[in-house]
Image: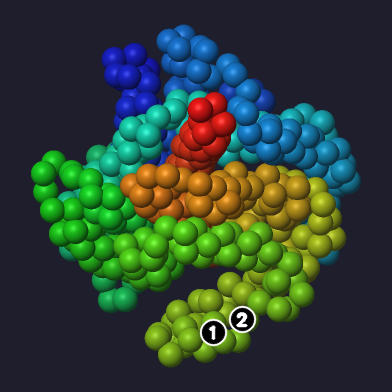
């Protein structure tokens, strides 16, 4: 992995390492280092990229970003984790005879949570910001995501026919419960990813990137990109993940047909909705009943699954509100348990995980990096001069919003959404500089 980082230029090496590890390394294999989260294929590549950059091009990764909100979010993540540890010193006892005992947290636990959050979110974003400096670098990211999805197509198609087996064939074990791969009378592929939902999200990102390339009149190996995008979309539908299919049905027409200024407006409105989602759910203003009715009209099983999710969220929200600012911390302290002390709650959405573990502070630190660039793109769009830049920035803002939306019903699974956020942030910084330069040119003349 480190060899690739030294043989290729930093941008392409980072893409090969980050995406290649996500696509082909095994799940459930971890390396434990003191004061660090378990290192696996999702976070270890970014640490390797950081180490290689410190050795090869240290100036790129040793400067604080000009975007002070990135620094604030990093401090919020680190300090918030420490305070979570310090405010959860009480032990928890469950069961009629105290059979389940969960110890209280301390400063060490708080540091661990802060560092784990930083490695998960802020590190991929910072590397994207520090390394991807030029217009061509953003184009490389879009092309890499598009190509990565296309590379995965034959693997996914084999599993659609033969059931998810690649991980067992290559690494000797299955990475997830097989029952969750059966859906709609067929199979939901996983290939080498942690879950079928993770694969569907990855293919969704690839489809959107193919549409961006087509709309920006880019080329890919001289092949008709529209045909590739349609092929990718059909395989995504065959993967049987309802959320990703819905997001593709909404996102593809928007990216392909809606003008950039309106596109980023829609993305910004959705970003605000994501930020407000916990408050809407807590207050009962989120339209749960209409969504369940619409899901029931499509498929009864989907409506039942959504109903379970909403009921579960209500219970988890009630517990999260007991420590709303800094959360309950790790080690299942945030879980709901029955009278016997057994866990009776399921954590599906990333938003409720962050809210219950680290409170509002953790929620903001986790979703802020994904949504602030979208809002910035909306503000900056009127001053972007080149039409091609407008389409690409709007498309990437839309993609980032869709990925953030998918974190409402589903888990995080992988950290490349934060890499995308960092790359988009850096491109917005460069476009802002270009706009200011154009404003000063008439005055200088």
Provide the secondary structure element on which disc 1 rests: helix
* Left or right: where 192 falls relative to 330: left
- Report how far apart the C-alphas of labels 2 and 1 lie in the structure: 6 Å
Q: Which mark is residue 288?
A: 2
Quickly name the residue at label 1: 292
The crowding category of the residue bearing disc 2, from other C-alpha atoms within 10 Å (few below 14, some 14 to 19, many at least 20), is: few
The percent position of residue 242, horizontal first and vertical second, equals 40, 71
Residue at left 63%, top 62%? 272
Q: Which of 427 and 167 is in front in this view?
A: 427
Kindly tell me whether residue 75 is visible in this rendering: yes
Q: Which of 164 and 76 is in front in this view?
A: 76
Compared with 303, 343 (above or below) is above
The crowding category of the residue bearing disc 1, from other C-alpha atoms within 10 Å (few below 14, some 14 to 19, many at least 20), is: some
Compared with 316, 7 (above or below) is above
* Left or right: where 355 falls relative to 177: right
Badge 2 vs badge 1, beta-carbon distance below 8 Å: yes
Residue at left 78%, top 34%? 79
Residue at left 33%, top 32%? 136
Provide the secondary structure element on which disc 2 rests: helix
The percent position of residue 117, horizontal first and vertical second, equals 64, 38
Q: Nearer the viewer, residue 230 or 236?
A: 230
Kindly tell me whether residue 95 is visible in this rendering: no
Which quarter of the figure has residue 288?
bottom right
* Left or right: where 82 falls relative to 136: right
Colour basis: rainbow
For the N terminus, the quadrant is: top left
Residue at left 71%, top 78%? 285
The percent position of residue 264, horizontal first and vertical second, equals 49, 58
Compared with 193, 324 (above or below) is below
Q: Nearer the viewer, residue 313 or 423?
A: 423
């Amino acid at each position: 992995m480190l060899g690739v980082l030294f043989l290729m230029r930093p941008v392409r090496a980072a893409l090969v390492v980050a995406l290649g590890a996500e696509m082909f390394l095994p799940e459930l294999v971890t390396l434990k280092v003191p004061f660090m989260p378990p290192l696996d294929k999702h976070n270890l590549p970014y640490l390797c990229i950081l180490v290689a950059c410190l050795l090869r091009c240290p100036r790129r990764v040793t400067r604080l970003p000009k975007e002070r909100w990135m620094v604030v979010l990093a401090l919020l993540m680190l300090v918030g984790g420490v305070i979570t540890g310090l405010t959860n010193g009480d032990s928890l006892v469950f069961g009629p005879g105290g059979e389940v005992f969960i110890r209280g947290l301390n400063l060490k636990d708080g540091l661990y949570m802060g560092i784990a959050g930083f490695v998960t979110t802020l590190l991929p974003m910072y590397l994207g910001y520090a390394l991807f400096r030029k217009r061509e670098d953003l184009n490389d990211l879009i092309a890499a995501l598009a190509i990565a999805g296309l590379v995965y197509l034959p693997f996914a198609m084999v599993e659609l026919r033969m059931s998810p087996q690649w991980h067992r064939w290559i690494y000797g074990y299955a990475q997830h419960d097989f029952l969750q791969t059966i859906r709609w009378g067929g199979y939901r592929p996983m290939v080498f990813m942690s879950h079928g939902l993770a694969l569907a999200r990855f293919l969704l990102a690839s489809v959107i990137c193919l549409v961006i390339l087509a709309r920006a009149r880019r080329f890919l190996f001289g092949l008709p990109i529209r045909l590739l995008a349609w092929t990718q979309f059909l395989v995504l539908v065959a993967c049987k993940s309802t959320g990703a299919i819905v997001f593709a049905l909404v996102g593809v027409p928007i990216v392909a047909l809606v003008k950039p200024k309106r596109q980023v407006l829609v993305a910004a409105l959705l970003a605000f909705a994501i930020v407000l989602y916990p408050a809407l759910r807590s207050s009962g203003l989120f339209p749960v009943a209409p969504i369940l009715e619409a899901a029931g009209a499509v498929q009864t099983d989907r409506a039942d699954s959504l109903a379970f999710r909403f009921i579960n969220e209500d219970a988890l929200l009630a517990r999260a509100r007991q420590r709303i600012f800094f959360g309950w911390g790790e080690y299942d302290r945030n879980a709901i348990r029955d009278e016997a002390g057994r866990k009776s709650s399921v954590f599906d959405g990333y938003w409720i995980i962050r809210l219950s573990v680290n409170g509002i502070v953790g929620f903001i630190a986790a979703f802020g990096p994904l949504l602030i660039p979208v809002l910035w793109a909306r503000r900056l769009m009127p001053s972007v001069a080149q039409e091609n830049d407008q389409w690409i920035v709007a498309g990437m803002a839309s993609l980032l919003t869709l990925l953030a939306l998918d974190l409402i019903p589903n888990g995080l699974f992988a950290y490349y959404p934060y890499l995308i956020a960092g790359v988009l942030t850096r491109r917005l910084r460069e476009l802002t500089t270009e706009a200011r330069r154009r404003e000063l040119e008439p005055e200088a003349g």
